[in-house]
Structure formats: C-alpha cells, structure tokens
Image: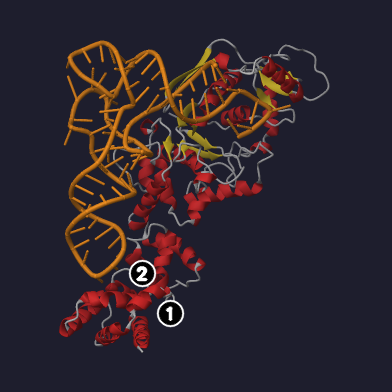
Amino acid sequence: MTKPRVRFAPSPTGYLHIGGVRTALFNWLWARKTGGAFILRIEDTDQERSTEASRQIILDSLGWLGIDWDEGPGKGGAHGPYTQMERLPIYAAHAERLIASGHAFRCFCTKAELDAQREVLKKKDPKAQFVYPGTCRSRSDRPDGPFVVRFNSPTEGSVTYVDKVFGEVVTPNSAQQDFVLLRSDGVPLYNFGAVVDDMTMGITLVARGRDHMVNTPPQIMLYGAFGAPVPEFAHLPMMLAPNGEKLSKRHGAVSVTEYRDQGYSPVAVLNYLARFGWSFGDKEVFSKEELISSFGWENCGRGDGKFDAKKFLAIDFEHLKSDALTTEDAYVARVRPFLAKNGVDASDDAKLKQAIRTIRGRARTYIEAAEMLDFYFREPPKVDEAAAAKFLVAASAPILSGFGAALRAGDAWDEKAVEERTNAWLAAAAIPIKDLGQPARVALTGKTASPGLWEVLAVLGRDASLARIDAAHARALGAGA
RNA sequence: GCCCUCGUCGUCUAGAGGUCAGGACCCCCGCCUUUCAAGCGGGCAAGACGGGUUCGAGUCCCGUCGAGGGCACCA
C-alpha cells in the first residue's frame, strides 16, 4: 500500500477558523500516523476576499499549533506551486483537455444573460430552480468575447462513493448541472481547482468538512472525465455554535490566534478539537503523540456537534496541570510572554520553575498562570486593598511580628524548615494557625487566595519574605493608630 | 421546491441485538483544608416520535418529525 497523501486547503480570507483547524488536524493526524504526507495548499481564487495578511495568519496559526506540512508554502515540494493563483496555466491546460475530449465546452452566455433568464423563470414560477439550459453545449463556433468553461454534466445515472465516515453515499446526476470549471478571467471555480490540484498533487484521501459533501459527486465526475483515479473521501461533521447556528465570531472566540492570545496550550487546542467528532473509548485527555497513535476514521462520528467553551477550558486545564502533558520547560516558555506583557521580569529560570510548581494545579490558562505568578516577581507585590484593609489591622500586628521573628530564628529556608519554625512558635504562643493564615497571606502575596504559605515562603526566599512581612506589620501598626 | 446527510444525558461522547445505557464537561452535595484551588467520594441527567423484524432493539428495516449542507463566473 502506498503512503497516503492528504491535504489541507484553506482560503486566506480571514482568521484561521477553529473548525478549519479541526479539518487540518484530522488530515495531519492521519498523515503522521501512517507516515504519509500532509500538504498545505492555499486556495486564493476568491480574489475579492483573499489577503496576504490572512495567508500569513494561517501559516502562523498552524505553526503555533505544531501542525507542520511536508509540502506547501515556505516548504516547497515536487508538486508546486502550492498557491492556486500561481497555478492558472495548469487549470487552463486541464480545461483544454476536457474540451478536447468533449467533457467540457466553452459557454459564451454572459452572467447578465443568465441572470435575466433566472429572473424570467422566477416570475413565472417563484419556486422553480433555475438550471443552466445547455445553451452553448454543442455550439461549434468560437465568437470573439469572453467565455467560461462548463462541464458537460450527465443528466442520467448517479454517482456512488463510500465515505470513510458516512459510508455509502448515492447522488443522482439529475442533481447536477453544467457547472462552471473556469471563469471568464481564467480563474478556476472551487470544484475544478480542487480536483485539478488534488489530482496533480497525488492526493489519495480528501478529508474535509461535511459542508463539502455535496461537492464530492461533481468532483468524482471530473476525475472520471480526466480518466484519473478517484481519491478516498472522508467528511467530518460540523462544529456548530451552542445555539446550533454556524459557529462564527458572534459566538465568541473562533480563531486560533484568539486562543493563543488567551493563553491556551496548543496541544490542548488539538486535544479538544480531536475529541470533537472523534473518540477513543472513554479517553478524554491526549498528548499529541497519543492523538497520532489513536486516530482513525472509523472512530469518527457522523452527527454535527456544538462547540462547548467550558469543556475546552477544562481540557486546557488538564494540559496545564499535567507535567507529562506540559513539561516544565514548555510551561516556562509559554507563560513567560504573558508575564512580560504584564511588565514582570521572570528571567530567573529556577525561581520561575519553582513558582510554577505552586500554581500549575490552579491555573487553567497561561493568562491565569501569569496573574497567579505575578506576586512572586513584583516588588513590592500588588496589594488587594480590600484584603489589606480586612487583614492588615491592629490585631494582626503582633501576629505578623511574631511570625517574622519565628522565621528569623533559623537559617534553613525551605518549605519544611519554615513550616517547622512557624508551627513551633504558634504552639508556644498558643495561636491557632487560622489566625496567622490570612494576614500572612496578604503580607506575602497581597491577596487572600494563593498557594500554601510554606510554598510561597520557599519560592520568595528569606529576604523578600521577611521584607514583605515587615512591611505588612508596619501597615498593621499604622492601621491601629 | 428539489438533492444529500444527520438525530444517545444541557454539551462532547461510549455502545458494533441481551449493559443497572458507561465516561467527561457543566451544576449540586460531602470529605480534605492556613486561603483559593486542586484532589477524593457521591448526586443530577439521555437513545426525537410511531410502526415493524426478533425470544430480545439505542443498535436492523420503514414512516413521521426535527436539524444541517447544497442547488453561483463563493470556497
């Protein structure tokens, strides 16, 4: 069996939609699992909407996700170019082939003429569906003037194919008409461009969204007309908004870059997307490697689904919590930009790692992590005034001074040592730890919610810890005056 | 209107004729606890509807209803 060749063919008409990423992901997983090739192709034939900026966003987004391509923009390959507008001569040549073999013809009807006919029909019967009447099908002259190339579509029979996820799909040819292959300006329409490209690029399996399922029969006809082998097809159910509408910007974040900017783990994004429309028993959380080894079309579902931001967040949380899923080095690399954005200098690698260990069980995104990490690196820490007003009061002053004194009573400074010294003092002074907890927390972190006291002390170190306790003590005394 | 699809807890899903219909998210309760989380334990909740086939159907067949995609010189 030859190695599969699959592709992802986005249009550079905006951000990279999360539904598009899922399509890319499934193709990519299959290529990586089977040792096949994953090809990236840019379908920019909609010149009205295609932009270079958007093309770059697609490339950047895939890069961030770690979805790499074997052939395509910036990578080259034996079947290029990989951008459709650079392939115009190829489409022209293929259109000529079909005209020569009688599978296609030049149509000189103008859009205006066709629209007029459409109008007339609409007037006669508002419910009727206009189909191209075959006006130019058998004309042999070749007048001056613009023309489109149309496919000579059969009206009888049907097209049958076996979808890798939907099974056998039969479509009567009566549903087809003489669809346009090449526009008058020589730019191909979707179905023609896709088939010529997939054919010449040696694509063996086309996996795409279910919204393309209706394009498959005409595309299969084209392969037949070219006498080319038909690739396999796999259609993926759609990802809808929670209310069942098509998922779009109005339903919240839908572009990959937004999730990147919100501090999501790229692997978590892959994980959530993979588990949407695909399953592997009861397993929910996957590493990238597990995704590759577990993936298969047979486990793809057929029903459309609704995007669930909460579940997505939960999956991200699983990835940030797990040392196996997100190594400490990866965590450092991902969270650092968010810290920098907040004006925090966390260049001390060892301290950052130690600090991360205390918060990674609580932060669901890197943005949350950066917020939780903030007090470790900011001197003095930001102080929650409500918390200070409540806990740094006169009554806390003796507790804070006692706490400082207890900590100063020894040299060892690690979680165990500071805990032992503190507990010894608390016991001797008959102070319940509950009385120390919140004042000490506010003193050290500026907040009422934080990792455990001993962990915080250990990460902060002796000097910073004592300085913060002293400052808080001073404030508590002042509050009493 | 016509063509093609789909239909299990609120959501993502497991299930390949015999299961107390399982897991996860959400939500609720409890335990743990120096705070907040996390963790652990428990709970809530489902096969669209109607007919068949079968000893037995979420699983197979038919119909109905509901939802989605398409019917372009968009992709």
Quadrant where the C terminus of chain A is found in the figure:
bottom left
Please, is residue B62 above or below residue A97 in the view?
above
> Could you tell me which secondary element the residue under label 2 belongs to?
helix
In the rendered image, residue A413, in percent from the top left (x then y), is placed at: 28, 80
User: Which picture quadrant has residue B30?
Assistant: bottom left
Which residue ends up furthest to the bottom in the rendered image?
A: A481
- For the point 51% across and 46% down, the residue is A254
Q: Residues within 10 Å of mark 2 (few under 14, many from 20)?
A: many
Q: Amino acid at mark 2?
A: Ala
In the rendered image, residue A253, in percent from the top left (x then y), is placed at: 50, 49
Q: Is residue A55 left or right of residue A149?
A: left
- For the point 66% across and 45% down, the residue is A51
In the picture of the structure, the residue carrying the numbered disc 1 is: A380
Instruction: For mark 1, name the chain.
Output: A
Q: Is residue B4 left or right of residue A450?
A: right
- Between residues A275 and A252, which one lies in front from this camera angle? A252
Q: Are marks 2 and 1 on the same chain?
A: yes
In the rendered image, residue A160, in percent from the top left (x then y), is placed at: 48, 17
Q: Is residue A174 left or right of residue A150?
A: left
> Could you tell me which secondary element the residue under label 1 belongs to?
loop
Q: Is residue A219 visible?
A: yes
Question: Which circle's residue, 2 or 1, is located before the other in the chain?
Answer: 2
In the picture of the structure, the residue carrying the numbered disc 2 is: A355
**Circle 2/circle 1 CB separation < 8 Å:** no
